[in-house]
Amino acid sequence: MSKKWYQRRDEEMETCPICKNEFELGQMYEYRGSLACEDCIEEMREKRDIERAEVIEEQNFKTDRFKGLDMSESQIGKANRAILKSDIEIAKKESKRLKDYEGS
């Protein structure tokens, strides 16, 4: 089964999410998955860096409670996993904020 990939052409127009002006795709700049025009790229970088820091903080909050705990196949590790089962399930799930950040 072959996949057909859509490839953008440089002539296609793209709207800058900050100033809302339209530009040819080849005139846009990309930073961490987001596009912006030349005039707005610094503002986009700041926004994406803040958003990235928030996503990392959220992910760390979900997993920090497991640091230093025995989660191996030992009796203690099994008991820890049983006690923390719901927290482990929550930590495994991808948050909406992470999905939005990654654009998936």
Image (cartoon, grey):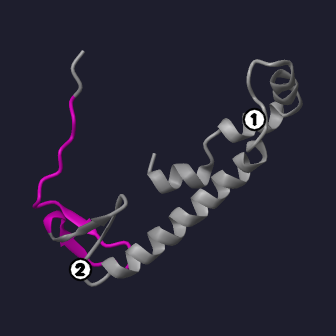
Residue tagged 1: 88
On the image, the x and y values in percent for residue 6 come to 21, 41
Q: Does the segment drawn in magenta span residue 13?
A: yes
Can residue 19 be seen? Answer: no
Highlighted magenta segment, given as a residue range: 4-26
On the image, the x and y values in percent for residue 29 come to 24, 69
The disc labelled 2 sits on which kind of residue? Glu
**Residue, x 29% and y 70% (percent of image)?**
15
Left or right of residue 11: residue 84: right
**Residue, x 28% and y 78% (percent of image)?**
21
Secondary structure at badge 2 equals: loop
On the image, the x and y values in percent for residue 7 come to 17, 45
**Residue, x 21% and y 20% (percent of image)?**
2
The disc labelled 1 sits on which kind of residue? Ile
Left or right of residue 48: residue 67: right
Left or right of residue 97: residue 2: left
Question: Residue 88 is drawn in which quadrant?
Answer: top right
Sequence-wise first label, 2 or 1: 2
How many numbered circles are shown?
A: 2
Q: Nearer the viewer, residue 35 or 52?
A: 52
Can residue 52 be seen? Answer: yes
Residue tagged 2: 38
For label 2, the crowd category at 10 Å Cα-Cα, with few meaning under 14, some 14 to 19 and many 20 or more, is: few
